[in-house]
Amino acid sequence: MYELVTETSTNLPYDVRRAIRAAKERENAGTRAALSLATITQNIDMADDNVLPICQDTGMLTFEIKVPVGANQIEMKKEIYEAIRQATKDGKLRPNSVDSLTGENSGDNIGPGTPIIHFEQWENDYIDARLIIKGGGCENKNIQYSLPMEIEGLGRAGRDLDGIRKCILHSVYQAQGQGCSAGFIGVGIGGDRISSYELAKKQLLRDVSDINDNPKLFELENYIMEKGNTLGIGTMGFGGEATLLGCKIGAANRLPASFFVSVAYNCWAFRRLGVTLDAESGTIQNWLYKEGEKISFKEDTETAAASEEPVREVVLQAPVTEEQIRELKVGDVVVINGDLHTGRDAIHHHLMDNDAPIDLNGQIIYHCGPVMLKDKEGEWHVKAAGPTTSIREEPYQGDIMKKFGIRAVMGKGGMGPKTLKALEEHGGVYLNAIGGAAQYYAECIKKVDGVDLMEFGIPEAMWHLKVEGFRAIVTMDSHGNSLHKDVDKTSFERLQQYSEKVFS
């Protein structure tokens, strides 16, 4: 189980690699989406080579395990817990299990409800163990519909195949770039509220290239893949050709009064592997999702090389002045050298009513919960450091920037109108880093200068970092411009084209 956990966290399955390469090949060279895909593929190889997390967000570990009759599931569960504790200690997982009432981090990814372990008996004489590590950013873009209902942009969705179609298309639209697109979706039709979501998540266990044995669902999967990729949301929500990398749909019976359609959204960093085990010894017999050629991206030609319009690069070194920020515009690439300070949900909530532990005037805040390890000398080292989804900080961000004089915030997925207005009034920018690129960005961090507010736990503490060559794209500027608002508007207009009935 330790080997399964480590491999799942650090090595993308082969079917996912193939889907990402296909997306990279069809993306237009020189675009923001192509630049993002180049970073993503570089990050995949770095994580594999270094046996370190692909993404810093451990998210929720979900095990689906089939066992022979008579297997001791109590002992197996204990061994899974021990494997997770060890993987966390070794820096393969970030401590991610938090008490919902106190906010206290357990420190070892073990707690009530975490991890999720589902056992099922079968009549085979071996064990089939599969693991999905699903990050919080993409988990937050899951969505459930109860039919019949009115769906924004698509009109009435009835209790039929066409109503289901509208739900799934809308689920792709509403995710935008906040779930680290391009993504994969699993869809569950029917059941009750709980079993419908469970069915949706189990669809993510299917191979990306498999064929649905239900002809109607097979046709619907192909339709969603085709139309979803015409919405123009693109990688990271920057616009582009690749929005959806996979769509798998399952159906279950339901009650006459209920008709649920549930969608489980998964980011491009689709961490899902499995093993078959000898039931007597527990040794690995075979790896799942590793069929065919293992794609490495090291030899790929850089599709992001030439742009019709040269990308403007601007170097920022904190403290940053308002004048420097006012010169930046949406589309500029920013290269950060010097100081960078992390701040996630707990930090933003804390700063609303408290002083900052350091002077933040002119500084840059990074929405990030890194994977950190301390060496024998007591020095902290960053093992993974990609951005988290920024929209969660929308209630606080503008007020905090004004209160402390912060000039730039960086994360992924963009922010809303309140922050955009504050950027314009205060003189600030939002920088979009590439979601999931935890190894790519960890390499840019040269030193940990210190940490404050460790009582919030490692992911939520404020880490003070020295960085070099830390790249991100300006997607919201101080002139009222927002790439995220523009892409949302365009994709919504394209979504409306699919309001007419297709399936009877």
Image (spheres, rainbow, N blue to C red):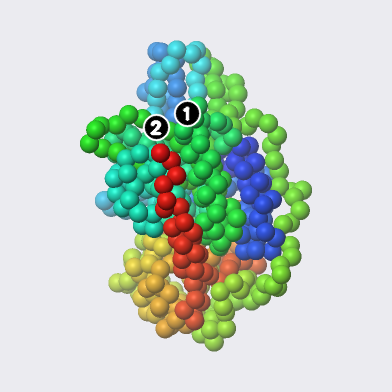
Along the viewing direction, whichever of 208 and 217 lies nearer the viewer? 217
Residue that label 1 marks: 214
* Residue at image location 62% in from the left, 43% down from the top: 19
The vertical placement of 230 against 467, above or below, is above
Is there any visible trace of residue 409 in the rendered image? yes
- Where is residue 349? Give x, y as percent: 33, 65
**Horizontal and vertical percent for residue 489?**
46, 66
Q: Residues within 10 Å of mark 1 (few under 14, many from 20)?
A: few
In-front residue for pair 14/255: 255
Q: Residue at x 35, y 54 (%)?
A: 155
What distance separates the C-alpha of mark 1 from that of mark 2? 9 Å
Residue closest to the far left: 257
Assign a secondary structure to mark 2. strand
Residue nearest the viewer, comparing 86 with 16: 16
Residue at 54%, 21% (x, y): give it. 277
| Camera-nearest label, 1 or 2 | 1
Residue of label 2: 251
Q: What's under tag 1, amino acid-wise?
A: Asn
Pinpoint residue 411: horizontal percent, then vertical percent: 49, 63
Q: Mark 1 and mark 2 in contact? Answer it, CB < 8 Å.
A: yes
Q: Position of residue 7 (x, y in %)?
A: 58, 37
Say which label, 1 or 2, has the lower sequence index.
1
